[in-house]
Structure formats: structure tokens, C-alpha cells
């Protein structure tokens, strides 16, 4: 079947089976590899993208279920005001270790901040609990979300 997806503001028409997960369409057909495969069963959050601004697990979302909704991926999250602030804070706090989980973390954090400009610790826990980081960068993720929410981005990473 043929599907026309709106990805990061651009239409992409793909000919593929309707039960193909969106993740593989993004990565293997469209060539956007920023969104990662972790578990494939909606348990780790590495594959998180936005559908009309809501975070979804693209590894379990059939491409036929996307419809006309806007797909946003890590490649374009800096084009949204909250996504840009989150990415700036991520750099300032030096959140990333190996990096594998981080596109998913940034997508979930950006969606949180877009709907809740001043998240509490509980709000952050609830929004981020489905994003697993094997490098355990959780403390820095929380700090970066708080910096992005405050609007005061300052470098807090340790000196080399
Ligand atoms: S790869 Fe989708 S949640 Fe883990
Ligand atoms: S930074 Fe390595 S898994 Fe999260």
C-alpha cells in the first residue's frame, strides 16, 4: 500500500505494508536514523517521536495508523521552541553518555515541556518514566528539564 506521511513538515509517500512500524519507515525508507530501536515492544522509549506533539513509541505504531497527523522526529525537534530549549539545556548540563537513548529522552522531555511549562519532580517522573537509560543519566536529565523550564540555560557540566 501507499501512505503519505507528514514528517518534520514535509510529505513523504512510501509504498510499504500497512503493519510496518513507523520506526522502520523513518529509518529504513525515509533515511532518518536519529530515532533509535531499543526493545521493539514499547518498553524503553528509544524510538519516541511526536504525533501532533504527543510522544508515541514508533516501534509499535503501524504506519497505517499515522494518518494525516504530523510526525516530528529528533531531526527537527530544535525547530519547536520547547525542543530548542531542551536541546540547549541538554548540552549545557552535558546529559549524554553513550547517547543511544537520548533522542527518545529529548522527544519525551520536549513533549512534557510543551504541555507543562513548569513541571514538578513528580510531573517529570511521570513523563520520563518510560524512557530507559542504561547509562543512568537520569539526574542530569532532570536537571536539564528544570533548566529548560526555567529559561535560564547555564553550563553546569564539570570542566574537563
Ligand atoms: S524501541 Fe520502541 S520503546 Fe523500545
Ligand atoms: S546515554 Fe547511554 S543509554 Fe542513555
Image (spheres, grey):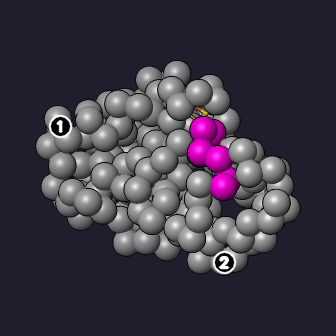
Q: Is mark 1 within 8 Å of ligand 2?
A: no
- Of helix, strand and loop, which one carries label 2? strand
- Vertical order, 39 against 116 (above or below): above
- Vertical order, 141 against 22 (above or below): above
Label 1, on which residue? 121
Q: Quadrant of the N terminus?
A: bottom right
Q: Residue furthest bottom?
A: 10
Give x and y (percent) for residue 66. Answer: 58, 59
- Vertical order, 11 against 108 (above or below): below
Was residue 5 drawn as part of the magenta stretch in this picture?
no
Give x and y (percent) for residue 84. Answer: 43, 66
The image quadrant of residue 31 is bottom right
The image quadrant of residue 47 is top right
The residue lying at 74 percent from left, 45 percent from top is 20
Give x and y (percent) for residue 46. Answer: 56, 37
Give x and y (percent) for residue 11. Answer: 69, 76
Q: CA distance from mark 2 to mark 1?
A: 36 Å
- Name the N-terminal-most of marks 2 and 1: 2
Along the viewing direction, whichever of 20 and 98 lies nearer the viewer: 20
Residue 114 located left or right of residue 97: left
The boundaries of the magenta stretch are: 58-64
Amino acid at each position: 500500500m501507499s501512505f503519505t506521511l507528514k514528517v518534520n513538515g514535509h510529505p513523504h509517500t512510501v509504498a510499504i505494508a500497512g503493519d510496518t512500524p513507523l520506526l522502520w519507515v523513518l529509518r529504513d525508507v525515509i533515511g532518518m536514523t536519529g530515532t533509535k530501536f531499543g526493545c521493539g515492544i514499547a518498553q524503553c522509549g528509544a524510538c519516541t517521536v511526536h504525533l501532533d506533539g504527543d510522544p508515541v513509541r514508533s516501534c509499535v505504531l503501524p504506519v497505517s495508523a499515522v494518518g494525516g497527523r504530523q510526525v516530528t522526529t529528533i531531526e527537527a525537534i530544535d525547530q519547536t521552541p520547547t525542543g530548542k530549549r531542551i536541546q540547549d539545556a541538554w548540552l549545557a548540563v552535558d546529559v549524554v553518555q553513550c547517547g543511544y537513548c537520548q533522542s527518545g529522552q529529548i522527544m519525551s522531555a520536549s513533549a512534557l515541556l510543551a504541555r507543562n511549562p513548569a513541571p514538578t519532580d513528580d510531573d517529570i517522573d511521570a513523563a520520563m518514566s518510560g524512557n530507559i537509560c542504561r547509562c543512568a543519566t537520569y539526574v542530569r536529565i532532570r536537571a536539564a528539564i528544570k533548566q529548560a523550564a526555567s529559561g535560564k540555560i547555564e553550563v553546569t557540566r564539570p570542566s574537563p
